[in-house]
Amino acid sequence: MNADIRLYSAQDIDELPVPGDSYALRVYRYVVPILKNGTEQYISNVRTDLRVLKYGNLYLPVTINSTDWDNSYVCSPYTHYITYANEELIRLPNHVLRFVLGLVLGRLGILLRYGKINKVVIVNNWMLSTNLYPTLHTDEISRITSHLKEKFPLHAILWRSVQTYHQKDLRSLFEKYGYLEVASRQVYLWDQKHPINQHSHKQLKTDEALLIDREYEQVHIDVLSREQSHRVRMLYDALYIDKYSRLNPQFTEAFFIHAVESVFDMTLLQKGGRIDGVLGILSLEGMGTASIFGYDTSVSPAAKLYRRLAIIGLDYCRKRNLIAHKSSGAASFKRNRGCVPEVEYTVVYAQHLPFRQRFVWKMLSILINSIGVPLIRRYEL
């Protein structure tokens, strides 16, 4: 039935044909080296069984896990919905609500472990904060799901980063096949076709002046040296690991070198030969996202490093007619520049699983969508 679908592992990856399709070729160039050398050489806190799924001309990265409770959230639903959520509670201004939700998450965590929440196969998982999607059709979702549930009868099948601003019918395609939706986060999208108000227009004009400001040199690179990769890692870590959370993907120096060699467009902000900012953009199927972003947090805010990097990323997408996926966080900054909020979902197929796993996913879907989404929207988490 599924003879035209195949999962390639480290043992047979050399048999995977080099594709001609643009999206598939980007998957191939990004995933194959990571698969061959092991994920931890590139992302130190991601432990997973990485594969490439080939279905006709469609190539998708697939990760397979069973436990790994301290894994990065990109491969661990437990980390995303329990460990990371606990860290996010500190941002709630309501102390009583923070205390109550802390108790709820503690009890919920026990139940999710009992329900084997981390026993998952995640499709189109680039192991980044944001997964961008090719155009998918009902037949592809149906066939891929059927193949994976036969091959992994005790694993839930997940697709992360699903939203409908860019692909209007994507969520409904999954729903037709019996997938549950579990909200994951609120992100911000910037689309030059979307009208913005006068205030946002003024903010963007102010930011655009930084594109020609000579205080920092913008260096677009095709090859990243080891010395540069060390500095880039320091800048990324200072922001995403040290300031925000160690649960974010912890990229190694090898990752940044590979990212530039494979699919990322990288810009460095330099002053006097020193790199003070980095922006790495992945663009696929009409959307661009800065999965690599960092700056020297010890530099005075007067240098406007965050604003400089943000407008470089937006300008990159505007020139290429891409929707800019600005991820989550810094909500007021992004809204003030005309970004549109959009709730992203993880969609889950669990119909083939034993009762306790089905029950836990259904319960999590109800809890997160009915309680979590209103909180995400209200407090802009």
Image: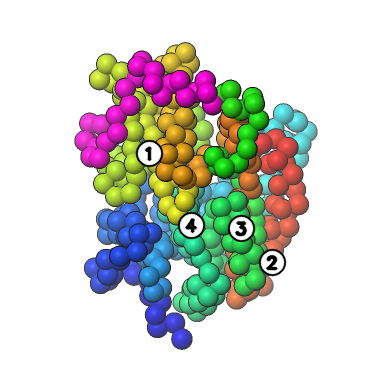
Kindly report which numbered mark, 1 or 3, lies closer to the viewer in this rendering: 3
Q: Which residues are magenta?
A: 204-229
Q: Tell me the amino acid under the disc marked 4.
A: Tyr
Residue 196: x percent and y percent? 63, 34
User: Sequence-wise, which precedes: disc 4 or disc 1?
Assistant: 4
What residue is shown at x 28% (from left), y 21% (from top)? Answer: 274
Q: Are marks 3 and 4 in contact (CB under 8 Å)?
A: no
User: Sequence-wise, which precedes: disc 3 or disc 2?
Assistant: 3
User: Sequence-wise, which precedes: disc 2 or disc 1?
Assistant: 1
Return the residue at label 3.
168
- Check disc 4 and report its element: helix, strand or loop: loop
In the picture, the disc for residue 100 is none
Kindly report which numbered mark, 3 or 4, lies closer to the viewer in this rendering: 3
Q: Is residue 93 above or below residue 303?
A: below
In the picture, the disc for residue 359 is 2
Q: Nearer the viewer, residue 170 or 130?
A: 170
Residue 36: x percent and y percent? 27, 59
What residue is shown at x 40% (from left), y 83% (from top)? Answer: 3
Return the residue at label 4.
133
Cα gap from disc 3 to disc 4, whole angstroms: 12 Å
Quarter of the rendering containing residue 332: top right
Quarter of the rendering containing residue 214: top left
Q: Tell me the amino acid under the disc marked 3.
A: Lys
Return the residue at label 1.
280
Q: Tell me the amino acid under the disc marked 1.
A: Gly
Q: Nearer the viewer, residue 371 or 173?
A: 173
Q: Is residue 1 visible?
A: yes
- Check disc 1 and report its element: helix, strand or loop: strand
User: Sequence-wise, which precedes: disc 3 or disc 4?
Assistant: 4
Q: Is residue 116 above or below residue 337?
A: below
Kindly report which numbered mark, 2 or 4, lies closer to the viewer in this rendering: 4
